[in-house]
Image (cartoon, rainbow, N blue to C red):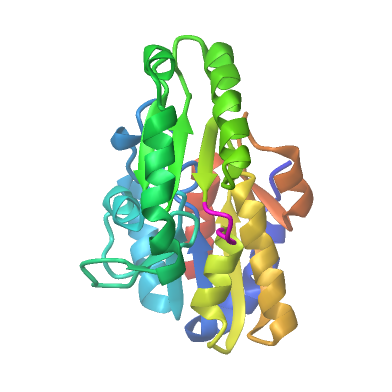
């Protein structure tokens, strides 16, 4: 169940007491922007954008952490003054930068991943209206809102088995399979890379999917490393919220409206 406002305010107190030494980290889809049938149509409402702008002015580090490519996440959020960790943290688009930075080891895998994805994006998948997404070193197969989701998922499971047999990693999200290189790629690793050389008083991460559990654990890693004093893990409730996310979260808020209220609480 989403937490009462007073409980949320208490959890956010370490950030509000020292905003210049605090980080606010947020997923995009389902958190800042409502989930939509066509991902290209996603956008962050103006009622959320206004408090996010104020948060960006007040807090030391503000970043969006998304499964989307960093440039695409920036398009959805439409705010250039914050950082974007794209493709689950494997690339970073810094405030004001034109192009994202990407790890060289991952870049070396890009051609192999995309070649495998194109080879296995066969006519049956296209007929089922499965969507192929190119995220450099990651390829995604999406089946949200296709005519027959069960048949599409069954077909995609065959691709997952082939990916694992070929030495890639098959990673499942909400109605998406991601084909990844056999190296660590997750939001937690991206957050650790972004923040490990800082000395922060506190950080909050807000997410709604299984991949965001890695981000929660990344904050715990930073506390153990001494780069962070306090960590707050916020889950976003919806009809598709995985139970594991709620179990790992310190607090739950209700949908994108709850996230907007959280941003307002950070600047109250």
* Quarter of the image with the N terminus in it: top right
Q: Quadrant of residue 220?
A: bottom right
Residue 224 visible in the shown view: yes
| Image side of residue 104 versus residue 26, left or right | left
Residue at x-position 58% and y-position 55%:
182
Residue 103 visible in the shown view: no
- In front of the other: 214 or 19: 214
Question: x, y percentage for residue 94?
Answer: 33, 72
| Image side of residue 49 versus residue 201, left or right | left
**31 lies above or below 26:** above
The residue most toward the front is 166
Magenta residues, as a range? 181-185
- In front of the other: 146 or 16: 146
- In front of the other: 77 or 11: 77
The residue most toward the right is 247
| Image side of residue 47 versus residue 174, left or right | left
The residue most toward the left is 98
Q: Quadrant of residue 29?
A: top left
Main secondary-structure element of the magenta-colored stretch: loop
């Amino acid at each position: 169940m989403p937490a009462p406002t007073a409980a949320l305010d208490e959890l956010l107190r370490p950030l509000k007491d020292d905003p210049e030494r605090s980080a606010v980290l947020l997923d995009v889809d389902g958190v800042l922007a409502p989930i939509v049938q066509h991902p290209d149509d996603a956008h962050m409402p103006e009622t959320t954008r206004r408090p996010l702008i104020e948060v960006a002015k007040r807090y030391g580090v503000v970043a969006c952490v998304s499964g989307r490519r960093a440039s695409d996440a920036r398009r959805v959020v439409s705010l250039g003054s914050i950082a974007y960790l794209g493709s689950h943290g494997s690339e970073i688009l810094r405030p004001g930068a034109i192009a994202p930075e990407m790890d060289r080891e991952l870049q070396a895998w890009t051609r192999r991943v995309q070649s495998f994805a194109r080879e296995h994006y066969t006519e049956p998948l296209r007929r089922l209206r499965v969507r192929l997404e190119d995220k450099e070193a990651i390829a995604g197969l999406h089946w949200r809102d296709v005519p027959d989701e069960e048949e599409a998922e069954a077909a995609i499971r065959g691709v997952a088995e082939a990916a694992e047999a070929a030495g890639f990693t098959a990673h499942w999200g909400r109605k998406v399979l991601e084909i990844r290189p056999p190296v660590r790629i997750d939001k937690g690793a991206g957050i650790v890379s972004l923040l490990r050389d800082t000395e922060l008083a506190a950080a909050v991460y807000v997410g709604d999917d299984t991949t965001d559990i890695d981000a929660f654990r990344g904050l715990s890693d930073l506390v153990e490393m001494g780069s962070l004093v306090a960590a707050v893990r916020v889950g976003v409730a919806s009809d598709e919220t995985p139970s594991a996310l709620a179990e790992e979260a310190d607090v739950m808020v209700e949908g994108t409206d709850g996230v907007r209220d959280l941003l307002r609480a950070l600047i109250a």
